[in-house]
Image (spheres, grey):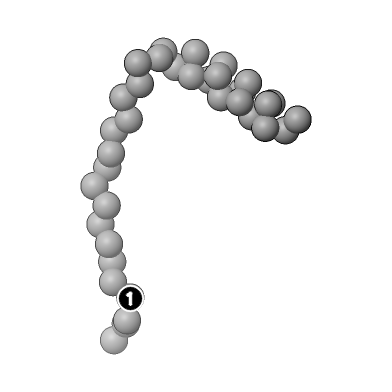
Amino acid sequence: MSDTAEVKIPEMQTVSALDPAETERMGTEIVAALKT
């Protein structure tokens, strides 16, 4: 018998007001800023 329990997490959908290209651009800029 196992002491672990299986947890089922429902799939969540993310909705953004920004288009995917803008999200990618911002993500790239944020990562670059964090590296400085």
Task: Residue at 27% x, 42% y: name it.
Answer: 11
* Farthest right residue in view: 36
Image coords of residue 18 (percent x, y): 40, 14
* Residue named by callout 1: 4
The spot of residue 2 in percent (x, y) is: 32, 82
Binning the other alpha carbons within 10 Å of mark 1 as few (below 14), some (14 to 19) or many (20 upward) gives few
Q: Residue at x 25, y 57 (%)?
A: 8
2 or 14, nearer to the observer? 14
Locate residue 7: give its quadrant: bottom left
Quadrant in which the C terminus is drawn: top right
The reply, left or right, for residue 14 in relation to residue 32 is left
- The spot of residue 14 in percent (x, y) is 32, 30
Front position in the image: 8 or 30: 30
Vertical relation: 28 (above or below) 19:
below
Q: Is residue 27 above or below residue 17?
A: below
Q: Is residue 24 above or below residue 11?
A: above
Question: Residue at 64% across / 29% down in the picture?
Answer: 31
Dot 1: element:
loop
Q: Residue furthest bottom?
A: 1
Give the amino acid type for the residue marked by disc 1 in the picture.
Thr
Residue 29 picture location, percent across and down: 63, 21
Question: Going by the image, does 22 lie left or right of 32?
Answer: left
Which quadrant, please, contains the N terminus? bottom left
Q: Is residue 2 above or below residue 21?
A: below
Count how many numbered circles sit on residues in the image: 1
- Locate residue 35 relative to residue 19 in the image: left or right: right
